[in-house]
Amino acid sequence: MLGNSKARNLGKLIATPFAKIFIKLGFTPDSITLLGTTGVVLVSVIFLANGQFLIGSVLFMLFVGLDAVDGTVARLLNRNSKWGAFFDSVLDRIADGAVLGSLAFYFASEQNVTYFVLSLISLVASEIVSYTKARAEGLGLNCDTGLAERPERVIVVVAGTFLAGIGINWMLLASIWVLAAISVITVIQRMLFVLKQTKIL
């Protein structure tokens, strides 16, 4: 997991200069969240779904980076809120669905059944990873565990699509295998983690 305090502090350090620019331009945290998600969806549909992986991966990385900026803007403006956290989480799910759905579409258009199915597995498992934590916390249980949270999954997608974009096509296929595996493993880890807590209770 990359979601430790050192990684978060590094993310804040990198995001702060960009956050200050967005603040000067008059952006709110929610508008940055919406901009980032809209960008990811458009990049996915226009580029990733059509196999244009180099430009797609670069633009995807830029737009998904706004996910760190919106939280920093909220902190600098002292506008952290439950609505903001909810809105950000919902739009993250939309962005993830667009990316993995577009990759599934690409493999379907290439008549590659194996990787089409793996992309769908990654899509479903990624959504369940997020749901398991939200549901567990809604029941008052801890679910802060798992091999791969969203940052790890994003890194795998960016690496695979970028390397495919520069001609190393097998890396995209490898990344889909890795993404499917770590997503399913994380779901299982979280279910077992919650199961242990319920037995204790």
Image (cartoon, rainbow, N blue to C red):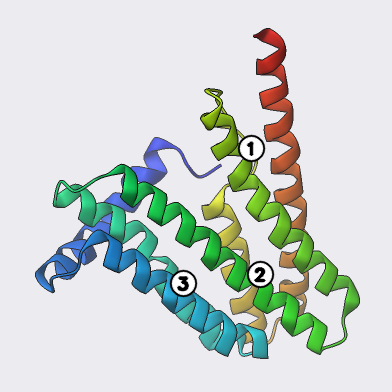
Q: At which x and y percent is residue 96?
A: 57, 64
- Residue at left 65%, top 41%? 147
- Name the residue type under label 3: Met
Label 2 or label 3, whichever lies nearer to me, is 2
Question: Which type of secondary structure does the marked residue at label 1 adopt?
Answer: loop
- Name the residue type under label 2: Leu
Numbered mark located on residue 146 in the image = 1
The furthest residue to the left = 24
Packing grade of label 1 (10 A; few <14, some 14-19, many >=20) is some
* Left/right of residue 167 with respect to residue 14 in the rendered view: right
Q: Is residue 12 above or below residue 109?
A: above
Q: What's the CA distance linking mark 2 and mark 3?
A: 14 Å
| Of the pair 198 and 68, the residue shown nearer to us | 198
Residue marked by disc 3: 61
Residue marked by disc 2: 100
Packing grade of label 3 (10 A; few <14, some 14-19, many >=20) is some
Numbered mark located on residue 36 in the image = none
- Name the residue type under label 1: Gly
* Left/right of residue 52 with respect to residue 14 in the rendered view: right
Query: Are discs 2 and 3 less than 8 Å apart at CB?
Result: no
- Residue at left 77%, top 66%? 120
| Of the pair 1 and 103, the residue shown nearer to us | 103
